[in-house]
Image (cartoon, rainbow, N blue to C red):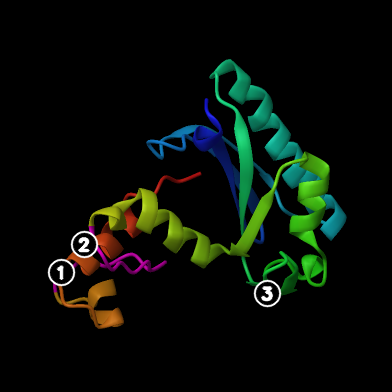
Amino acid sequence: MTAAGLATIGLDVGGTKAAAVLVDPITGTVLDRERASSAGSAENLVTTLTDLVETLRARSTGLHVEVGAVGLGIAGLVDRDGMVRWSPNLPAAVGHPVAADLAGGSGLPVAATNDATAATLAESRLGAGRAVTTSLWSPWAPVSAPGSWSTDDYCGVPTGSPVSRATWWSTRAAPSI
C-alpha cells in the first residue's frame, strides 16, 4: 500500500472489554477484529491494548496491508494528549497517559478521544452518515413498537430525515465487535 493507503487499527475501550478492528483505508471495510478484557490497572490496560495492536498488525501482513496508525476511543473524558481525565467505567485509567504509552509500546502514532466521539466520526466518514452533510450518532437504538418513543423523537430530529436515517442505521448496522 502507498503511504496514503495505510490501514488503521481502531480500538474501542469500555469498562469490560477492549475491541480492536483493522480497517481498510479506502473502503472502510473491517479486515480483521480481536477483543480482550479491559479490566485491571492502567498498566495492564496499556499492555492489553498494545497486545491487540500487535496481534492485528501481525495478521495484517497476511492480508498484504501495512498499518500506519491507531485510533483509540475510550469511555470517559480524554484530553487532546490522550490522557484519561475521568471515566466511570475505567477508574484505574484516570490520570494515565494511555495514548502516549500505547504509542510507545506499538511504535505507531495514536489518536485518542472519547468513545462516542470516535463512533460519531467513524459513522460520518465510513458509515451511515457518509452520504449526508450533517449526521448525528446516538447510542440509543430506536424502539419500533407502535406508540413507543424512538431515537428520532428523543433527539428532536424529524423522523425520516437524512439525519434520522443515519442515526437509525448507526445504531442498527454498526458491527458488533
**In x, y percent, where is residue 127?**
34, 50
Local packing at callout 3 (Cα closer than 10 Å; few below 14, some 14-19, many 20+) is few
Find residue 78 and name its label.
none
Find residue 161 and name its label.
1
Q: Which stretch is magenta?
A: 132-146
Q: Magenta stretch: residue 123 in it?
A: no
The CA distance from mark 2 to mark 3 is: 30 Å
Local packing at callout 1 (Cα closer than 10 Å; few below 14, some 14-19, many 20+) is few
The rendered magenta stretch, by its main secondary structure, is classed as loop
Image: 1 above or below 37? above
Instruction: Please identify, in this view, whether the residue under mark 2 or under mark 3 is nearer the observer.
Output: 2
Q: Is residue 18 rendered to the left or right of residue 92?
A: left
Instruction: Name the residue beneath numbered marker 2.
Output: 165
Local packing at callout 2 (Cα closer than 10 Å; few below 14, some 14-19, many 20+) is many
Residue type marked 2: Arg
What residue do we see at 38% from left, 68% from top? 138
Image: 2 above or below 99? above
Secondary structure, mark 3, is loop
What residue do we see at 40% from left, 36% from top? 26
What residue do we see at 66% from left, 61% from top? 15
**In x, y percent, where is residue 91?**
77, 70
Image: 150 above or below 58? below
Cβ atoms at labels 2 and 3 below 8 Å apart = no
Image: 28 above or below 172? above
Q: Is residue 1 rendered to the left or right of residue 83?
A: left
Q: Is residue 109 visible?
A: yes
The CA distance from mark 1 to mark 2 is: 6 Å
- Tag 3 or tag 2, which sits nearer the N-term? 3
Q: Is residue 79 rendered to the left or right of residue 129?
A: right
Secondary structure, mark 1, is loop
